[in-house]
């Protein structure tokens, strides 16, 4: 889905079984697919199930330089592509959210990164002085395998009452939080395992 306007996604089914799935994988080490949603406008996710199998230098939700992203709930699963097993799933996953947009606000949701070794669940980068990437995460649950839950790669992130768990160590990549390129993370509460 490419959003150039205002898009709200809400699962209105009684069983809460609405799902958006990406099964397109790129070649290992290539850009692959921009996952589920390429956001140039204002995107609000209220609920639903989001499953991404893609791998490469991409993202499940790409929040562009002038875009705004709000996630209030939902279940997000990145499964990694089985064809990458030979490389120990190296590079075998998209970030859930990759943003150099002006604003990302997450106030709920469950994010699970399966089998992925190097790609963070959230990567907030610095676009330029006019629109530095900013993100606030609160009341969200983030589970990763051997990758960071969140990387502030030049952007600024505030965490409030998030539940973050990394299954296994993997040097810089397997930490709960990672900061690079003069990024900033402000922790105001939460559980980090």
Image: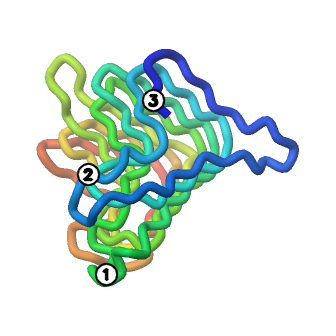
Any mark on residue 2, and which? Answer: 3
Closer to us: 43 or 153: 43
Give the secondary structure at mark 3. strand
Q: Residues within 10 Å of mark 1 (few under 14, many from 20)?
A: few
Whether residue 188 appears in this view of the structure is: no
Q: Residues within 10 Å of mark 3 (few under 14, many from 20)?
A: some
Q: Which residue is mark 2?
A: 31
Q: Which residue is mark 1?
A: 88
Any mark on residue 127, and which? Answer: none
Residue 126 placement: quadrant: top left
**Residue drawn at x 44%, y 64% as measured from the top left:** 192
- Percent x, y of residue 12: 79, 35
Image position of 122 (left or right of 12): left
**Residue drawn at x 23%, y 27% as measured from the top left:** 132
**Residue drawn at x 15%, y 21% as measured from the top left:** 129
- Percent x, y of residue 11: 73, 38
Image position of 4 (left or right of 17): left
CA separation in Å, label 3 and label 1: 31 Å
Residue 159 placement: quadrant: top left
Image position of 106 (left or right of 117): right
Q: Residues within 10 Å of mark 2 (few under 14, many from 20)?
A: some
- Up/down of 128 relative to 91, above or below: above
Query: Which badge, 2 or 1, comes first in the chain's sequence?
Result: 2
């Amino acid at each position: 889905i490419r959003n150039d306007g205002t898009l709200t996604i809400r699962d209105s089914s009684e069983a809460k079984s609405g799902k958006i799935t990406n099964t397109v994988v790129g070649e290992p080490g290539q850009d692959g697919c921009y996952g589920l949603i390429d956001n140039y406008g204002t995107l609000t996710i209220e609920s639903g199930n989001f499953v991404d199998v893609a791998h490469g230098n991409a993202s499940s939700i790409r929040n562009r330089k002038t875009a705004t992203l709000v996630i209030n709930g939902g279940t997000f699963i990145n499964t990694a592509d089985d064809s990458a097993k030979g490389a120990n799933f190296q590079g075998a996953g998209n970030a859930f959210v990759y943003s150099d947009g002006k604003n990302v606000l997450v106030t709920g949701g469950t994010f699970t990164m399966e089998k992925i070794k190097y790609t963070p669940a959230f990567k907030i980068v610095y676009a330029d002085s006019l629109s530095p990437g900013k993100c606030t995460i609160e009341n969200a649950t983030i589970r990763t395998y051997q990758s960071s839950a969140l990387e502030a790669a030049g952007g600024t992130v505030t965490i409030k009452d998030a539940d973050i768990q990394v299954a296994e160590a993997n040097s810089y990549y397997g930490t709960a939080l990672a900061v690079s390129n003069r990024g900033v993370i402000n922790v105001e509460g939460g559980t980090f395992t």
